Amino acid sequence: MCKTTDTVRTCELDPSLRDYMVEFRHDVHRLPELGFREKRTSDCVAEALRSFNIEVFQNKGVVGVLKAGNSQRVIALRAELDALPIQETSTHDYASIVPKTMHACGHDGHMAMLLGAAKYLSETRAFDGTVIFIFQPNEENGLGAKAMLEEEVLARFGIEEIYAIHNLPGAPLGEISTRAGLICNSESLFEIEIKGQGGHASMPDVGVDTILVGSEVVQALQTIVARKLPPGSGAVVSVTEFITDGARNILPGLTILKGDVRAQNPEHRTKIERLMRQIATGVAATHDVEVHVKFQTEFIETINHSENAAAVVRVAKRVTNQVIADREPMSFSEDFAYFLAAIPGCLLLLGNGVEDVHGKPLHSSNYDFNDDALMIGARFWASLVAERLPIGDA
């Protein structure tokens, strides 16, 4: 049950809840599904919510609605459904049996923690208001939150504020960290196509070798962060693919550069795009070749709201003695950003552990969510609901 300490109510969960969450996580881990293909995963989540007597709506994702008391206040808690296109190399007995698909980001754990909290809250009704449990598809490609927003999930259920947890390998087990303001960078993808005159490797003077041009562009792109943005900007420009139509004795007439940009604010993101186009156009003009630049922002910056971040910190201090209230922003991106751009809320990070597999990086083929974090996350969720939707003056 929940108990009051100062103005924050913390909830003690029955240890048996851990077994339920572990069983659920291992099941969906064994049978992962990619973005917008999460049919079985969605059905498993929906079935679980219904078994808790929670009203369920299914479309692009799964939404559970749980009401208690008379308050009109509505908050939402969000988890993700999708896995990644990675071949798992782990040897545990619940390793993925789906080829080239695995839960390498911990979304299986995020789902299990939220379902654990939903089960507890449905049994105790230890709050006054409405809790919306959002299980969204396709976070990894930055499309799931936008899809649910297009379905008007916020307006349909009257959601006033929203929260999400992401696990963090390499951080001590149970450590909760967050910050007001920027918490995760944006991600933009770029593609630079260079068209010249290919030819024979023995006669480079006859054409224009686009490998040489592409190499100049790659080098010049590194000056954007180093010389065009303020020190400590947190921006990253990475060329991740260099593709040509050349061969052993053929100079390529086509080179394509692809890459990834991370930024901590829209102004820097816009400036990077402008400078990237300027550099590519300038180098191309020098060599008299054609160039085409595509720049697409997949994830915007994730910005936590001050009041909600403060609430997370207050609750976290009752759940664990490991709390960082103003952590450094993360360089990775989160499509939870689109929810936070629409309504107030907060993303927080939960330590997954520092040793063995639990310290492996997100998106690695031998990563695994830490089962020992499940009770901590579920307890945090239940305590946050109790704090944000309090019963009278209790």
Image: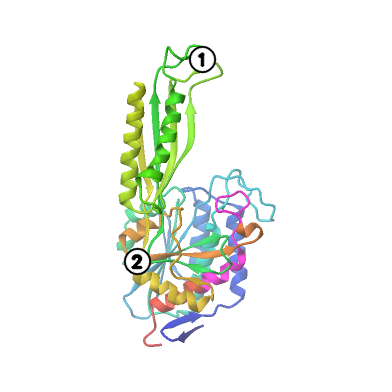
The span shown in magenta is 360-379
- Residue for point 33% across, 74% down: 73
Classify the position of the C terminus by image quarter. Answer: bottom left
Instruction: From the viewer's side, name the closer residue of 316 and 51.
Output: 316
Near mark 2 (Cα within 10 A), the count class, few <14, some 14-19 or many ≥20, is: many
Question: Which residue position holds label 1?
Answer: 201
Q: CA distance from mark 1 to mark 2?
A: 58 Å
- Residue for point 59% across, 43% down: 100
Q: Is residue 116 above or below residue 10?
A: above
Near mark 1 (Cα within 10 A), the count class, few <14, some 14-19 or many ≥20, is: some
What's the amino acid at mark 2?
His
- Residue 75: x and y, percent? 37, 70
Asked if residue 175 can be seen in this view, the reply is yes
Is 363 covered by the magenta stretch? Answer: yes
What's the amino acid at mark 1?
Ala
The answer to whether the residue labelled 1 contacts the one labelled 2, judged by CB atoms less than 8 Å apart, is no
Is 224 covered by the magenta stretch? Answer: no
Q: Is residue 134 above or below residue 185?
A: below
Asked if residue 122 can be seen in this view, the reply is no
Mark 1 or mark 2, earlier in chain: 1
Question: Which residue position holds label 2?
Answer: 305
Which label lies toward us, 1 or 2?
A: 1
- Residue 193: x and y, percent? 39, 29
